[in-house]
Amino acid sequence: MDENIIVQCTNCGAKNRIPKARLNDAPRCGACHMPLNIMSFHDRPVVVADSSFKQEVLDYPGLVIVDFWAPWCAPCRMVAPALERLASEYAGALKVAKLNVDENPVTASSYGIRSIPSLLIFRNGKLVDTLIGAMPYEEIKSRIDYHGAFHSN
C-alpha cells in the first residue's frame, strides 16, 4: 500500500493527500489547482544555522518546531528520537529544525536560550510557543496538535 503525505496548499490552505511515490509528478491542489509546494515536505529534521534561520524558519509558511540543542547535552540526545518521529509522522504539516547553540550563538541569544533543550514553535514565522527541557514524545505532540498540525498518515 502506498504511503500518503498531506501537503497544505500555500495558496488556499487546503490539505491535499499525495502518494509519496507521486511527489515528483508536480502535484496540484485539489481545491484551487495551483502547484503544491512540495519543497515544504520534510520527513526528517532539518539542520539550521544562524545564516539560514530566517529562510528555513521565519520565512517558512506553516508550523516549525526548532530544537535548540548541543551535542554534549544528554537531555538533548533524549529528545532527538521524539523529534525524528514527529518529523516523520507530521511530514508536510510540520517542519522540524535543529539548531546547535554552540555553533550558532547569535540565533540562540536572540531568542534568550539559556537552557537546552529548548523547543520553540513558530507558525508562519511568528513564535507561538516555547517548551524547555527534555519532554516526552506525547507532550511535544500535544503542543504541536494544539497549534494546528495534523498527521500525514
Image: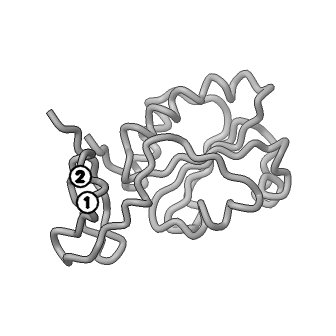
Residue 99: % across, % down? 70, 46
Q: Are marks 2 and 1 in contact (CB under 8 Å)?
A: yes
Type of amino acid under label 1:
Asp
Under tag 2, what secondary structure?
Answer: helix
Quarter in which the N terminus is drawn: top left
Q: Look at mark 1 in the image and give the residue it sits on.
A: 25
**Residue 131 figure quarter:** top right
Q: Where is residue 19 in the image (x, y as percent from the top left)?
A: 21, 48
Badge 2: few (under 14), some or many (20 or more) residues near its Cα, within 10 Å?
few
Q: Which mark is residue 22?
A: 2
Q: Which of 21 and 98 is in front in this view?
A: 21
Viewer-side residue, 30 vs 138:
30
Q: Is residue 90 above or below residue 10?
A: above
- The answer to whether residue 65 is above or below residue 55 is above
Q: Quarter of the image holding residue 37?
A: bottom left
Question: Residue at the location (43% across, 60% down)?
Answer: 39
As shown in the figure, which amino acid type bears the numbered disc 2?
Arg
In front here: 100 or 129?
Answer: 100
Quadrant of the image containing the C terminus:
top left
Please tell me which residue is depicted at 52% across the width and 35% down the height of the picture: 83
Percent across and percent down for residue 127 are: 60, 62
Taking 100 as reference, is 34 left or right? left
Query: Quick one: label 1, few (<14), some, or many (20+) residues within 10 Å?
Result: few
Dividing the picture into quadrants, the one containing residue 28 is bottom left
Q: Which mark is residue 113?
A: none
Cα separation between marks 2 and 1? 5 Å
Percent across and percent down for residue 7 are 31, 58
Helix, strand or loop at label 1? It is: helix
